[in-house]
Image (cartoon, helix red, strand yellow):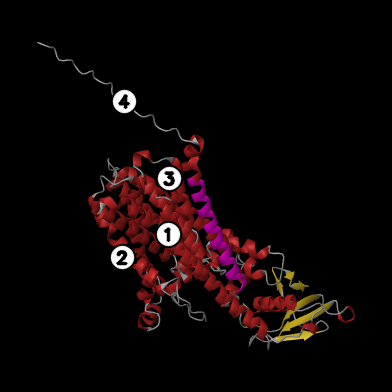
Amino acid sequence: MTQRKRKQRLAPPPAPKPVAPRFPRLQAAMPIVLQVLQIMGGMLLVAAIVFSDAQIARHKFFWLDEGAEIETNCQVTPLTTGRSTGGYFPVYYSLQRVATDYWPRYDESILVGYRLVSLAFVGISMGTLYAVLHWQLGAAWAYLALATLAGQNIFHFYAAESRPYFAWLACFVLALLAAAVAGNLDWQKLRKREYGLLVAACLLLTLVATPGVGQAATLLFTCGLCWRLLAPTPIPWSRALLLIAPPVGLMVALWFYYAGGMSSAAPDINNLVVELQQGETKLLVEVLRLLFAGPHPVPGLEIGIPNGSAPVLQALNLLMLAGVVAPVFWWRQRATLDRPTRFLFVLTICALVQILLSILIAIGLAFRYYFVAKMFIYLIACYAVLVLAGAHLLTQFALHTFPRSRQLTTVLARGALPALVVLLVARHVQNYNAAYWLKYDGFIKSAEISCSVWGDTTKFYRKAQSSPEIPFNMIVTIAEKMRRCPLPAADQRKAMSYVVLSSSSGFETGLDFLNKPPAGVPVLSYCGREVLIAR
């Protein structure tokens, strides 16, 4: 029998070697480069927002309350006077004293110079917001939060004013972020750094506004509940009180020191009744309107432009409503939440508690004095948090329902939506700035002041005044007119001209131009310095 030849087994082909990358160092550095570009993009966006608000401030005249606060800054020392000031809390008023007392120029630049505190708080709050959200959630969510805030008319309205309301918003944002970072940690892993930042932010919030002590104490108690309910090992109540009680006691003592004179006044129930009966104000409705993206008209502001684009606004409002119910879903999964979702969960809880507290604050403030609904500007920060929570919840739902479309969902949620909102906000801010410029430019052109009345230096006098903002706006008007006028011929120039504010009926009708100093009329001065304008 013939033997069958065995077939020789062929050795398996060698596994293909992976193709070596052409630029290994570049590919290894790409994540770092991308992160640096994201951070730079966020800082550029913050800088653009600050610059836009500075441009709005440059074209926005002072009004009654701004002028009154500027005039009182020279007589008030908030850091030391405390109770006698009747509620001048030092975080804003001390900085405003520095900005107005040491601003060297008296011309149209005071529109920006006297509002530097609010503009600085824009940069601090928005920069911190972007940095913390980029660290905890990622760049796309940070961009979305910045754009949601900057898309509100009321944000730019108060950012470009010398008023304490934006300082309140900025300190509220800092305290809200600090509470979310601290509450997201296990209490056993809470370091001195996070706890110290939380206490410092709450102290800032206490020292910026009368209701700040209630907000700060509520944030601390919310952190205690998170350490108790969300931590793997609940914090003992004694340990929680040891962390919360000392800063709360310090904040209450500071509040009594700075608001003691105001708190001793008897409440006026008539104010609350008037506010509840007044059809235009609608006490709680006007406050809660700040939780929805809309025009938010401010009485006396003759500029009516919509916030961004209407379809995008309605989409953001729907995301906000989804954010209200997001904690219910996350509570059921609290043991398995990843770090970003857990942080957003704590942040949303803090925002919802502050929204409920704002209703009590509104009623309490209405007892004391005439209620201004727009002073609750800090609620737009809660709105931005709820928008983030709603977008994050819907993204999780889409990824769970359509697992094959993970890449598409990620691109839409983290790329297309923030980019679209940022572009619309940029267009909106441009329109807002242009509207103020048209109003400012039209008023300057309508002021009938001849270019021949001024000398190289103009000195101001004040004969009568009923509104404190008029002298400052008079300076702005004349300085802008002088800047636009051509230089006179050499034989027509004069060294000094004199302007008297004779009435408060209007800028043009209330100005008297003289060739010599008026007799018996005091010089217009600020903080002991005479007001002069040179060409």
- For this orientation, the residue located farthest to the top is 1
Q: Check disc 2 and report the residue beneath it.
A: 321
Q: Earlier in the sequence, mark 1 or mark 3?
A: 3
The answer to the question of whether label 1 and label 3 lie on touching residues, with beta carbons closer than 8 A, is no
Q: Quadrant of the N terminus?
A: top left
- Left or right, residue 296 beside residue 449: left
- Left or right, residue 127 beside residue 485: left
Instruction: Find residue 277 and report its horizontal and vertical position in percent.
Output: 35, 83
- Left or right, residue 485 beside residue 17: right
Between tags 4 and 3, which lies in front?
Answer: 4
Q: Earlier in the sequence, mark 4 or mark 3?
A: 4
Instruction: Find residue 63 and report its horizontal and vertical position in percent.
Output: 58, 77
Between tags 1 and 4, which lies in front?
Answer: 4
Q: Check disc 3 and report the residue beneath it.
A: 195
Point out the stretch of residues depicted in magenta.
34-59
> Amino acid type of disc 4?
Pro
At mark 2, the secondary structure is helix
The answer to the question of whether label 2 and label 1 lie on touching residues, with beta carbons closer than 8 A, is no
Q: Check disc 4 and report the residue beneath it.
A: 13
The answer to the question of whether label 3 and label 2 lie on touching residues, with beta carbons closer than 8 A, is no
Q: Earlier in the sequence, mark 1 or mark 4?
A: 4
- Taking depth in this image into account, of 501 and 143 the one nearest to the observer is 143
Rounded to the nearest angstrom, the CA distance separating label 1 from label 3 is 32 Å
